[in-house]
Image: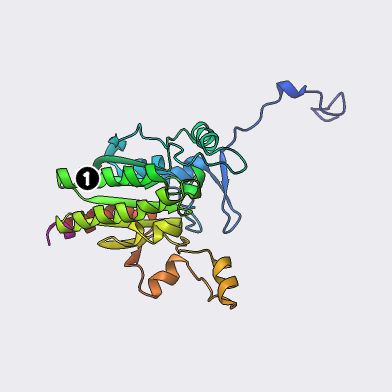
Amino acid sequence: MAWFKRKEKGVKTPTEAKKESPDGLWYKSPKTGKIFHTRELKNNSYVCVDDGYHVRVGSQEYFEILFDNIEFEELDAHLESDDPLNFSDTKPYQKRIEASQQKTGLKDAVRAATGKINGLPVVVACMDFSFIGGSMGSVVGEKIARAIDYSLENKVPFLMISKSGGARMMEAGFSLMQMAKTSAKLALLSEAKIPYVSLMTDPTTGGVTASYAMLGDFNIAEPGALIGFAGPRIIRETIGKDLPKGFQSAEFLLEHGFLDFIVDRRDLKNRLTTLFKMLQNK
């Protein structure tokens, strides 16, 4: 006789007593389908170990990767969007903002902070795609402009990490004005000879690409990032032709001269340190 024998058939554990794995414990790579523990993913800068796939992450993760000892001071954290046009589509714009704030814990689609990267003081502005698709509204433009002002006043390099679906339609012209405002601020940064590096991540599109994302002293990107103005489907329908393979990928843009180089997120901190030191010594 076997030393263990089930006396009753079937599972008898009540539903409320069952223990389930918490959400977010495992991550499945969309590139190969392999599964990784999230702790392993975090320790590898949110890059899949086997295939190098760069997982989409937000400002908090980038701040943890870049700032020494995860020590930083957030700038203008209190700013949040108003509803200048009383806009409403499937729901009022103000309700959409409130829902996004509750879901993400963010005030808007960008956060700015100052700290040190390998001992070098730097200002970093990073977009969050989880907040209304990383769309660029008036608060996004204002926070980036103020972050650039901080760089000017303190004479420290500026890093912009873009991740956006483009301009925020709910603010119409107010959103589009941010393209000119941020570009003008970056011109002041250039005149003051303060380094500016633009990092484009997946995806960087629309008015963001058409303004501050492409105005860096160095324009760099993460592997496989989608970068462009209009989406591939819109372009294909407009010109009536099939697009080249890999169109609007970081690798395609690098090949055609729109990027300076592509950087693996695991090497980002050291590569940025080298760039900023080189630009400061010019």
Which element carries disc 1, helix, strand or loop?
A: helix
- Looking at the rendered image, the quarter that the C terminus falls into is bottom left
Q: Residue at 80%, 27% (x, y): give it.
A: 4
Residue 69 falls in which quadrant of the image?
Answer: top left
Instruction: Considering the whole magenta stretch, tell me its main secondary structure.
Output: helix
Q: Residue at 51%, 41% (x, y): give it.
A: 38
Q: Can see residue 269?
A: no
- Looking at the rendered image, the quarter that the N terminus falls into is top right
Residue 183 falls in which quadrant of the image?
Answer: bottom left
Q: How is the image coloured?
A: rainbow
Could you tell me residue 189's position as x and y percent? 20, 54
Residue hosting label 1: 149
Q: Is residue 187 above or below residue 102?
A: below
Q: In this image, 209 relative to 282: left or right? A: right
Residue 281 is covered by the magenta coloring: yes
Residue 116 falls in which quadrant of the image?
Answer: top left
Magenta region: 278-282
Q: Is residue 230 above or below residue 9?
A: below
Outermost residue to the left: 281
Q: Nearer the viewer, residue 2 or 235?
A: 235
Q: In this image, 165 relative to 150: left or right? A: right
Q: Residue at 43%, 69% (x, y): give it.
A: 251
Could you tell me residue 47's position as x and y percent? 46, 52
Q: Nearer the viewer, residue 9 or 158?
A: 158
Q: Residue at 54%, 34% (x, y): give it.
A: 95
Q: Is residue 151 above or below residue 223?
A: above
* Disc 1 packing (10 Å; few <14; some 14–19; many ≥20): some
Q: Tell me which amino acid carries mark 1.
A: Asp
Outermost residue to the front: 85
Residue 51 is covered by the magenta coloring: no
Could you tell me residue 5's position as x and y percent? 83, 27
Could you tell me residue 209's position as x and y percent? 40, 60
